[in-house]
Image (spheres, rainbow, N blue to C red):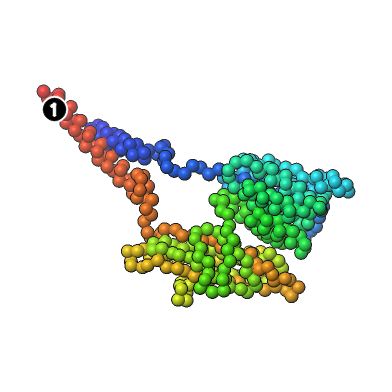
């Protein structure tokens, strides 16, 4: 009984000490960042008559799209508000004016009910026209409001059939609104003109274009784009690499865009301080027809030409982007190492058929991050109570000891009082 009382006193002291320092489990940190606003994504699906074509893994384009949507809806990240809009799903006639208004919201942007969304998609039948421009304008309105990221994923197998409303100009108009809406485009077995139009739409808003030839490829790519909506909004900065490290642009942490001609190498520089880790990744996008078997090189080199780290990745024509990434930890200042400028080389081994233009160059997206090296303590972890589990444990142990001691003193005083 005495032991139970002492332990109760000690546990109470520990909890009081934790609460006094703001460490009680139910207590939120005053300086913790506020919850991120919910990202919004709308999938815009072409349901025009051409989606009947049976050229994706032996099934129709519409069937492949439905299967992909089933996979995607099962894996939407928690908190993402997702909607679905169709184009060409309802009007079967030949009146152009009516056909070019044929877009509707199949499932509203908001918290996802997977069963309801899947049921809605299952009812779709390839029907009418391809009003891409009107669908983009309507989808932009669907995604209005809120402070979270906004992403529109367009899945189509053909060009817009509602000119003169040019969907590329529509995308530029949406970008000019300053609402940070990114449009990604996916072309199902596209011809050259469809590919050009979808590439233009994507580039106008900082999005990506992907050619789709298989159902699994469609599922994977849409999942990636939906997942990407949870990333913090970063506006890419245009830069221009040089033919050598000398005179190359000096880059800080951020995302950068450039263009690189076929089989070209470009250079950039990054200043790395002691105790930092350089993390860099690059993606080179094939925005036109290219020969199979290609690769991307990313490497870090010292100013004297010594290679520090490298990565090279290859492709075989089944995807429109190849990515590579490197990490380079800089020893801490305690080891006597000075700051260092690292030369970053981006190269590619793409080639194109004789009929394909090689200018402008291929789109390049380069991401640079400078973080505290994993083996270096972060200053934040030692500032402010409660940062780090070791501090939590120390305070709890201190509280338990203080509680036991106070319980023993209280019992001793009570015994002394009774003996008088």
Q: Residues within 10 Å of mark 1 (few under 14, many from 20)?
A: few
Residue at numbered disc 1: 416
Q: Name the residue nearer the viewer: 242 or 46.
A: 242
The image shows residue 359, relative to residue 152, as above or below, that is below
Q: Is residue 228 left or right of residue 104?
A: left
Determine the residue located farthest toward the left in the rendered image. 420
Instruction: Determine the residue positioned at 65% across, 67% down.
Output: 362
Task: For the C terminus, give its image quadrant.
Answer: top left
Disc 1, SS: helix
Instruction: Determine the residue positioned at 76% across, 60% down.
Output: 194
Q: Name the residue nearer the viewer: 382 or 174.
A: 174
Q: Quadrant of residue 292?
A: bottom right
Q: Is residue 367 left or right of residue 41?
A: left
Image coordinates for residue 67, horizontal then vertical, percent:
70, 52
Instruction: Determine the residue positioned at 45% across, 65% down.
Output: 271
Q: Name the residue nearer the viewer: 57 or 185.
A: 185
Image coordinates for residue 220, horizontal then vertical, percent:
64, 57
Q: Is residue 84 left or right of residue 374?
A: right
Q: How many marks?
A: 1
Instruction: Determine the residue positioned at 51% across, 63% down.
Output: 251
The image shows residue 269, relative to residue 130, as above or below, that is below
Image coordinates for residue 247, horizontal then vertical, percent:
52, 71
Task: For the N terminus, give its image quadrant.
Answer: top left
Determine the residue located farthest toward the right in the rendered image. 94
């Amino acid at each position: 009984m005495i032991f139970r009382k002492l332990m109760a006193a000690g546990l109470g002291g520990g909890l009081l000490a934790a609460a006094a320092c703001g460490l009680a489990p139910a207590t939120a940190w005053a300086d913790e960042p506020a919850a991120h606003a919910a990202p919004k994504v709308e999938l815009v699906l072409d349901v025009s008559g051409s989606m009947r074509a049976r050229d994706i893994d032996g099934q129709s384009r519409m069937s492949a799209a439905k299967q992909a949507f089933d996979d995607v809806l099962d894996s939407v990240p928690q908190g993402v508000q997702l909607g679905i809009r169709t184009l060409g799903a309802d009007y079967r006639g030949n009146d152009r004016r009516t056909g070019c208004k044929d877009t509707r919201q199949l499932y509203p942007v908001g918290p996802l009910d997977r069963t309801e969304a899947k049921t809605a998609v299952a009812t779709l039948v390839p029907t009418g026209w391809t009003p891409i421009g009107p669908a983009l304008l309507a989808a932009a309105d669907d995604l209005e409001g809120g402070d979270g990221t906004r992403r529109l994923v367009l899945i189509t197998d053909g060009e817009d059939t509602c000119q003169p409303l040019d969907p590329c100009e529509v995308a530029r108009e949406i970008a000019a609104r300053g609402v940070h809406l990114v449009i990604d485009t996916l072309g199902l077995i596209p011809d050259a003109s469809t590919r050009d139009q979808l590439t233009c739409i994507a580039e106008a808003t900082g999005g990506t274009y992907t050619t789709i030839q298989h159902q699994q490829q469609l599922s994977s790519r849409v999942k990636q784009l939906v997942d990407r909506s949870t990333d913090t909004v970063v506006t890419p900065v245009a830069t221009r690499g040089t033919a050598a490290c000398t005179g190359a642009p000096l880059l800080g942490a951020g995302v950068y865009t450039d263009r690189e001609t076929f089989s070209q190498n470009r250079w950039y520089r990054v200043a790395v301080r002691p105790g930092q880790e350089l993390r860099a990744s690059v993606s080179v996008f094939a925005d036109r027809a290219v020969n199979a078997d290609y690769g991307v090189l990313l490497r870090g080199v010292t100013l004297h030409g010594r290679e520090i780290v490298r990565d090279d990745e290859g492709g075989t024509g089944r995807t429109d982007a190849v990515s590579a990434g490197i990490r380079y930890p800089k020893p801490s200042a305690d080891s006597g190492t000075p700051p260092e400028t690292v030369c970053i080389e981006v190269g590619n081994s793409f080639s194109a058929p004789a009929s394909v233009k090689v200018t402008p160059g291929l789109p390049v997206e380069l991401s640079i991050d400078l973080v505290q090296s994993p083996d270096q303590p972060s200053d934040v972890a030692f500032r402010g109570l409660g940062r780090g589990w070791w501090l939590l444990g120390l305070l709890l142990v201190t509280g338990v000891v203080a509680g036991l001691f106070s319980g023993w003193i209280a019992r001793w005083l009570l015994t002394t009082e009774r003996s008088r």
